[in-house]
């Protein structure tokens, strides 16, 4: 790929990545690129603490509440590949700035939504705008940092900032909700967007491919037609069991996915280069990122609900209780690339995920111990330790496994699986917990009278009509929620244990696949 305009003077077209080192401008540019990265992570979790206040105002159903949270992540995942390709055509810095402006507009629309349906649509628009931010950040880092060690460290910082934004979401949300209404959680994006639009032309170079094929809109449509019906099917099965609508959604999604794969094999410039999957390290890292982020995304939503709806903490107090755990993620994201230089990424990832398993097992005991809040802090520190490690090392493995001419496609895929993992985690683990809750509360509807529908729908619904419930019934609802929470945490522990084993076995000699050698 030819790189046009604003290229740092010390980077020549034939520079040796082993000798070329980034200068002050590149590191300053990395600091700027950290802003949209933090923002995207922040926006994924900032809304969790706002859900109770939002539910009281907009009165969404349990299904609408889930879509309010995960529509954002699903739309990001669906459009990442498309936006990564678009950035190559119009310029990565240009796409970043256009996306930032659109993100600001969508944030305002979300903040002032007047109904659950309007908020879902606004969140979906926010996700499309967010998809324009992520590919340029990682792609620009790959272009700005040609030295392998510097690139690994820069990607580690990038991944850590995204994860840090996720962890800071509950804290920032708690502080905002303590003084303002729930819509303030969206307006936090505006200062970041403004700073990015002003400073980006000064620090970030412009990179674009001078000659490329037109964007294949059929591939874009097929990618969305594959993703969204599958997600719908999963949500419906968890909500109502196996039914015609759910199975039809899964079938449509599977067929569209197969057609998408077939089309990518025939295109000269596909949205996804399927040859990348011939590399074992590439495949393994993507799978670990997907499952790891699935577990974290769903569990974080459940923990914020536990702290507010079961323990009874305010949004600010709940956010502050989760804050100290984020230090483990920050530590892992910075130190994991340094430790991996000596021991290799496989053993480091496996060890970190093994500690995360312990964290999920502790969460599976939540509700059976009087030390609930303290247990959450300790458990999430272990969970975040694994998250910081896989975010840093997993992303670097994905980017490094691909040859230079395929780095853009590899970067986009890394971002897709992380966003998809977070969204699928919220949908599947949230739906699993809701399904268990409803099964536990199935016989209580009539006893609750007119409040029975809200009681049987979700714990948030039960809390919203607590004054109308018979004595002791709210405690039954909280116990039913905890049964579902414990089941979800146990599922996460099993899944992450499998990923730890896979990392230890499959990543002993990363980069040995075909893609890395091509």
Image (cartoon, rainbow, N blue to C red):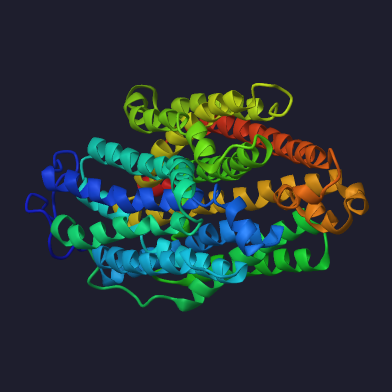
Which residue occupies 38% across, 42% down? 159
**In this picture, is 319 found above or below 353?**
below
**In this picture, is 277 found above or below 92?**
above
**In this picture, is 243 found above or below 352?**
below
Depth check: 264 or 145 in front? 145
**In this picture, is 209 found above or below 518?**
below
Q: Which quadrant would residue 81 be assigned to in this image?
A: bottom left
Which residue occupies 30% across, 67% down? 95
Q: In this view, does 52 lie to the left or right of 279?
A: right
Residue sitting at the far front:
467
Depth check: 417 or 232 in front? 232
Q: Is residue 140 left or right of residue 117?
A: left
- Quarter occupied by the N terminus: bottom left
Judge whether residue 504 can be spotted in this image.
Answer: no
Q: How many marks?
A: 0
x and y, in percent, of residue 33 in the image? 27, 51
x and y, in percent, of residue 367 in the image? 72, 29
x and y, in percent, of residue 267 in the image? 44, 72
Judge whether residue 235 can be spotted in this image.
Answer: yes
x and y, in percent, of residue 389 in the image? 43, 33
Which residue occupies 77% across, 64% down? 247
Residue sitting at the far left:
9
Q: Which quadrant would residue 450 be assigned to in this image?
A: bottom right
Which residue occupies 86% across, 45% down? 470
């Amino acid at each position: 790929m030819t790189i046009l305009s604003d290229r740092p003077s010390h980077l020549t077209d034939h520079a040796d990545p082993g000798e070329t080192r980034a200068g002050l401008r590149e590191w300053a540019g990395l600091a700027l690129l950290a802003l949209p990265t933090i923002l995207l992570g922040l926006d994924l979790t900032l809304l969790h603490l706002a859900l109770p206040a939002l539910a009281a105002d907009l009165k969404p159903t349990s299904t609408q509440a889930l879509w309010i949270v995960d529509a954002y992540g699903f739309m990001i995942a669906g459009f990442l590949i498309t936006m990564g390709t678009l950035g190559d055509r119009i310029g990565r810095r240009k796409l970043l700035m256009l996306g930032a402006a659109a993100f600001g507009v969508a944030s305002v629309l979300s903040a002032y939504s007047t109904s659950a349906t309007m908020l879902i649509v606004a969140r979906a628009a926010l996700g499309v705008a967010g998809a324009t931010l992520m590919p340029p950040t990682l792609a620009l880092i790959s272009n700005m940092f040609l030295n392998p060690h510097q690139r690994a460290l820069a990607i580690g910082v990038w991944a850590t900032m995204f994860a840090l934004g996720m962890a800071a979401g509950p804290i920032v949300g708690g502080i905002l909700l303590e003084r303002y209404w729930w819509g303030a959680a969206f307006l936090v994006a505006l200062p970041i967007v403004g700073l990015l639009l002003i400073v980006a032309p000064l620090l970030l170079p412009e990179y674009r491919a001078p000659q490329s094929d037109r964007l294949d809109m059929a591939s874009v449509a097929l990618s969305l037609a594959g993703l969204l019906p599958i997600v719908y099917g999963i949500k419906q099965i968890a909500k109502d069991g196996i039914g015609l609508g759910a199975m039809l959604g899964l079938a449509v999604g599977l067929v569209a996915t197969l057609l998408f794969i077939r089309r990518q094999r025939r295109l000269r410039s596909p949205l996804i280069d399927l040859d990348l999957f011939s590399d074992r390290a590439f495949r393994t890292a993507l799978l670990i990122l997907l499952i790891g982020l699935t577990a974290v995304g769903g569990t974080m939503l459940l923990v914020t609900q536990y702290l507010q709806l079961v323990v009874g903490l305010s949004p600010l107090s709940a956010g502050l209780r989760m804050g100290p755990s984020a230090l483990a993620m920050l530590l892992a994201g910075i130190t994991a690339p340094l430790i991996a230089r000596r021991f290799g990424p496989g053993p480091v990832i496996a060890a970190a995920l093994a500690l995360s398993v312990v964290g999920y097992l502790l969460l599976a005991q939540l509700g059976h111990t009087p030390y609930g809040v303290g247990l959450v802090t300790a458990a999430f520190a272990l969970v975040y330790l694994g998250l910081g490690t896989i975010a840093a090392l997993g992303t670097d493995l994905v980017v490094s496994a691909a040859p230079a001419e395929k780095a853009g496609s590899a970067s986009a895929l890394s971002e897709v699986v992380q966003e998809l993992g977070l969204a699928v985690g919220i949908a599947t683990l949230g739906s699993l917990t809701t399904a268990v809750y409803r099964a536990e509360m199935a016989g209580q509807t009539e006893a609750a009278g007119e409040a029975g529908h809200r009681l049987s729908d979700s714990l948030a619904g039960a809390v919203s009509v607590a004054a109308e419930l018979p004595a002791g019934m709210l405690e039954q609802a909280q116990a039913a929620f905890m049964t579902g929470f414990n089941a979800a945490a146990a599922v996460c522990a099993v899944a992450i244990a499998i990923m730890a084993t896979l990392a230890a076995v499959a990543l002993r000699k990363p980069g040995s696949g075909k893609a890395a050698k091509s």
